[in-house]
Image: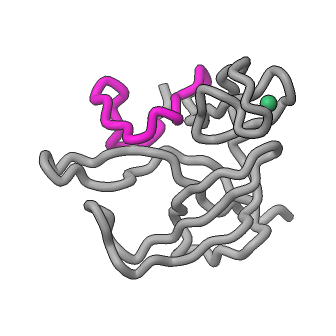
């Protein structure tokens, strides 16, 4: 079985964000909500549709890759997050997702770049010192 992240152990339950799951192919996947009435998709999941207010909604797996809409780099830390860190919005096929980014220092990150979902350490639990996991996106290799 492929490791999603070297330090991640599914049984540890150290996932901050319940909106990410490990799919059957061992890759992480984000879960949003799709409205059965108007097909509007939101992330994170909600008990009702933000577009038409219907509660006829169900969980839906989101695309794992998308394009960078916008991002910024924070130089002030907060809640166990070490600065600097990058965060912003990613456009998936049918929904816009707020996310932090990884590997943005190693490779330059530009608006419009293709990015992919990864499970990553989000922060350190201030009480236990243990890493907490959640979703991030990283730049994909240039297409030739
Ligand atoms: Zn709706």
Q: Position of residue 24 (x, y in %)?
A: 59, 20
What's the residue at 69%, 57% (across, down)?
A: 90
* 13 displayed left or right of 144: left
Q: Position of residue 92 (x, y in %)?
A: 76, 48
- Figure quadrant, ligand 1: top right
Query: Does the segment drawn in magenta span residue 14?
Result: yes
What's the residue at 47%, 38% (across, down)?
A: 4
* 117 displayed left or right of 126: right
| Part of the protein shown in magenta | 4-25
How many numbered badges does the structure rendering display?
0
Q: Position of residue 139 (x, y in %)?
A: 65, 63
**Does the magenta stretch mainly form a helix, a strand or a loop?**
loop
Q: Give the farthest residue toward the left.
A: 127
What's the residue at 51%, 62% (across, down)?
A: 102
What's the residue at 52%, 35% (across, down)?
A: 20
Q: Give the farthest residue toward the bottom.
A: 75
Q: Quadrant of residue 44?
A: top right
Query: Does the segment drawn in magenta span residue 121?
Result: no
Above or below for 141 versus 92: below
């Amino acid at each position: 079985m492929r490791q999603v992240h070297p330090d991640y152990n599914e049984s540890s339950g150290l996932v901050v964000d319940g909106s990410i799951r490990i799919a059957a192919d061992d890759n992480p996947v984000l879960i949003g909500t799709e409205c059965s009435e108007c097909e509007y998709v939101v992330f994170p999941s909600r008990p009702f549709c933000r577009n038409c207010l219907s509660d006829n909604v169900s969980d839906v797996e989101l695309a794992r890759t998308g394009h960078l809409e916008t991002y910024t780099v924070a130089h002030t830390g907060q809640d166990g997050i070490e600065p600097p860190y990058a965060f912003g919005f990613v456009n998936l096929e049918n929904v816009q997702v707020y996310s932090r980014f990884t590997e943005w220092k190693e490779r330059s990150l530009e608006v419009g770049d293709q990015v992919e979902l990864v499970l990553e350490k989000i922060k350190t639990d201030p009480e236990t010192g243990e890493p907490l996991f959640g979703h991030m996106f990283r730049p994909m290799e240039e297409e030739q």
